[in-house]
Image (spheres, rainbow, N blue to C red):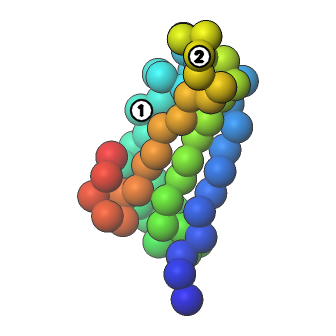
């Protein structure tokens, strides 16, 4: 069975860009909950032609 994807909305682009999760704790959280990928996103963007800004964390695959 494939792992889960956690999708997290963030209201502020500044907050989204400043996220610096603790990789060890995030990896433990993902493993304990069967989560493969965490995608955080915001509708606040820096370029008007974009609709969303996203970041992806996948600590179980070594993607910080």
Counting from the top left corner in percent of width and height, residue 46 is at 54, 11
Residue 8 placed where, x, y %? 66, 44
Look at 59% across and 16% down and name the residue there. 49
Displayed quadrant of residue 50: top right
Q: Which residue is mark 2?
A: 49
Provide residue 64's location: percent of width, then percent of height. 33, 46
Query: Residue at point 31% right, 64% down?
Result: 61
Q: Residue furthest left?
A: 62
* Residues under numbered marks 1 and 2 in contact, where contact means CB atoms less than 8 Å apart: no
**Would residue 19 be visible to someone looking at this image?**
yes
Q: Secondary structure at mark 1?
A: loop
Q: Nearer the viewer, mark 1 or mark 2?
A: 2
Q: Is residue 25 visible in this depiction of the protein? A: no
Q: Earlier in the sequence, mark 1 or mark 2?
A: 1
Label 2 sits on a secondary structure element that is: loop
Q: Label 1, label 2: how many angstroms apart (C-alpha)?
A: 26 Å
Residue at 41% over, 32% down: 20
User: Is residue 20 rendered to the left or right of residue 52?
Assistant: left
Look at the picture and state if 49 lies above or below 26.
above
61 displayed left or right of 41: left
Residue position for label 1:
20
In percent of the image, x 62 and y 57: which residue is there?
A: 6
């Amino acid at each position: 069975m494939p792992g889960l994807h956690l999708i997290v909305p963030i209201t502020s682009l500044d907050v989204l860009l400043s996220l610096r999760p603790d990789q060890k704790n995030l990896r433990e959280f993902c493993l304990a909950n069967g989560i493969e990928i965490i995608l955080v996103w915001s509708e606040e963007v820096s370029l008007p032609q974009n609709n969303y800004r996203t970041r992806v964390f996948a600590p179980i695959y070594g993607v910080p």
